[in-house]
Image (cartoon, coloured by chain):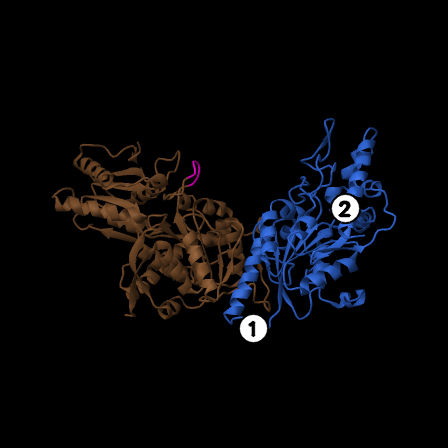
Amino acid sequence: MPEQKTIAATGNIFVAEAMRQCAPDVMAAYPITPQTTIVEEYAKFVAQGKVHTEYVTVESEHSAMSACVGASAAGARVMTATSSQGLALMWEELHIASGMRLPIVMANANRALSAPINIHCDHSDVMGARDTGWVILFAETAQEAYDNTIVACRVAEDPDVLLPVMTCLDGFITTHSIDRGQTIDDETVKAFVGERKPDYALLDTANPVSHGSFAGLGGPFFEFKRSQRDAIDRSKPVVERVGAEWSKIVGRPFGLIETWGLEDADVAVVVIGSSAGNARHVARQLRAEGGTKAAVVKIRCFRPFPAAELAAALKGMKAVAVLDRAESFGAEGGPLFLETRSALYDLERRVPVVNYIYGLGGADVKLELMRRVYSDLSDIASGAAAAEGLRYLGAR
Amino acid sequence: MPNLKELTHREDLLAGGHRLCAGCGAPIALRMIMLAKPDDMEMVAGCATGCVEVSTTIYPYSSWKVPFIHNAFENAGATVSGVEAAFKGLQRAGKIPADKKMKFVAFGGDGGTYDIGLQSLSGAMERGHNVLYVCYDNGAYMNTGIQRSGATPHYAWATTSEVGPAQQGKQQQRKDLTAIIADHGVYAAQASISHWKDLVTKAEKAFTLDGPAFINVFAPCPRGWRIPYNSSVEISKLAVQTGFWPLYEVEDGQWRITTKVHNKKPITEFLKPQGRFKHLFKPGNEALLEQLQAEVDRNYERVLARCGS
């Protein structure tokens, strides 16, 4: 196993470091809180001559993703980073990047969407982009943000995939808190990610191709979309395989989902991102107190959605709570709830699922709030309460 | 600058068979621009959504003999910036020969350039990419059905600046985009499909300078202007001869008239053949014509003043 260096740094610094090690040819980015320290750190690498990257300091996020599309179609390895309003401004380009089957890696510092304006964490930005055709990975910690970035680079450029990948980390909680983690030497990352080998590069001027053609006159638009569906379906085993390969090198787990305490649990919490830590901590406390035997299922790969994996993990549970850090206004619950409940629909025995909206705009998810979730689950499991209603966790 | 005979021997980089309308000024502009590409230089073309894009790349066909990318409506400047950045990054990585010469050329209509794509174009110019941005200016959103744009002339009819008892066409004057881009400190020029030598000379200069350049080409739309399809070049000539569309270039901050107009023709000679201005010739609208003449004179004088002549 190659030697790893333990460092203390923020999630954003871990992401910038991973990006440097993946050696993108182009970085096109626009500053937005709380993503800024990624692009600032990268600007230092450029100034210090540590990277060969052409750094395009665009005038908006729309142009950031537009330039990434151009650069990826040109045949370059391309990375960027954004957050919140920036991701929203890119929305049109997110579809174009995936529709044109362009590998691009983008870090997203999860932040609430306006209005009212707020700079703190929730997942409403990325959940608004969940159907844009990107592979979407989430980090719980700075370490996972580092690992996800490197895995994303391989997944995006895999010939079976050729799709953009978004790697999410929670704004401020993960982006700005100093965390302990390990980095590995440049040579190991370089060998792991390899070189991009594009098939139809614009810069291959001897073999001119047209990208972004018009398929609107009874053309094959429908078939293009079908092949895009096949590509993101194919990305699932690729995420698993590349993740397992990376896991073997660094000695850290990498799965579409991560489960804790599943073996003997009666109830479970499904969660994404940094709140998984509090969910496990309270579950551990409850077990030590002789209380509820709860499991925690954390989703690391949100797109493609690990429906079969979730169904297998949650099968037989007496109650499940899905924690959504985003709203889906007017729907029956948050986006993670909707997809999780759907994933459980085909189980022979119905699993009661309840939804909590929590932590919007950076609202704290304190341990006592997490305790309330387990207490509710316990009541549902015992039949003392029904699994119904959308619950706003901690809203005054 | 090659002569006309030499130009005819160069390869046309936009193949025939595309679906642009008969008499459309845009493909004339594109072909003349690309004829100016030096032989020792390769290019990538980018294109904003619009008439040219939908008519030249109907899948699985393409008229483009050079690598081509269409991304969206408002971002040709940023998209081509990205392609150019990829070239620089890959060249720095040693994956593209250090002596390979390339130019990155974006094409956009006036809607995609004056209006929705202005920010993206401004960013590309400000950052100094080795990009030539060519606007084919036909003065309205023609692809979507002749809606007014920031480039539509004052009082012109368009489907969103209608003519009726309460309003005589577009109520605002045009935006002077060429001057706006020139003020970015880049090479900027105004050209017309009617003046091939002037246009090709400017394009050749833009190809060979290492940095951003902008050429705004007057390119009539017979359908939108309500003119016969065989009159595009004539109308373009009148645009120049009336002073409506002065031909000039701005290089290193120096403005220079490239085709001097002696004895400007009255603006009515440009307006009269075009159906989009026909309401202006109805009784009662004489004052509007006078106003347009005054505006053209003022704009032309302003260009002359900036050119120091």
Q: Residues within 10 Å of mark 2 (few under 14, many from 20)?
A: few
Chain ID for label 2?
B
State whether residue B73 appears in this view: no
- Residue shown at the point (81%, 39%) measured from the top left: B293
Q: Nearer the viewer, residue B146 or B291?
A: B291
Residue that carries the numbered disc 2 in the rendered image: B302
**Which amino acid does the dot numbered 1 rest on?**
Pro
- Are dots 1 and 2 in contact, CB under 8 Å? no
Determine the secondary structure under disc 1.
loop
| Picture layout, residue A335 above or below residue A176 | above
Residue B39 appears left or right of A217: right
- Magenta segment, prevailing SS (helix, strand or loop): loop
Residue that carries the numbered disc 1 in the rendered image: B97
Which portion, as a residue range, is magenta? A113-117
On the image, the x and y values in percent for residue A279 come to 24, 45
User: Which dot, 1 or 2, sits closer to the camera?
Assistant: 2
Question: In the rendered picture, chain B carries what hue?
Answer: blue
Q: CA distance from mark 1 to mark 2?
A: 46 Å
Q: Is residue A114 magenta?
A: yes
Question: In the rendered picture, chain A carries what hue?
Answer: brown
- Residue shown at the point (45%, 65%) measured from the top left: A48
Residue B197 placement: quadrant: bottom right
Q: Quadrant of the N terminus of chain B?
A: bottom right
**Which amino acid does the dot numbered 2 rest on?**
Arg
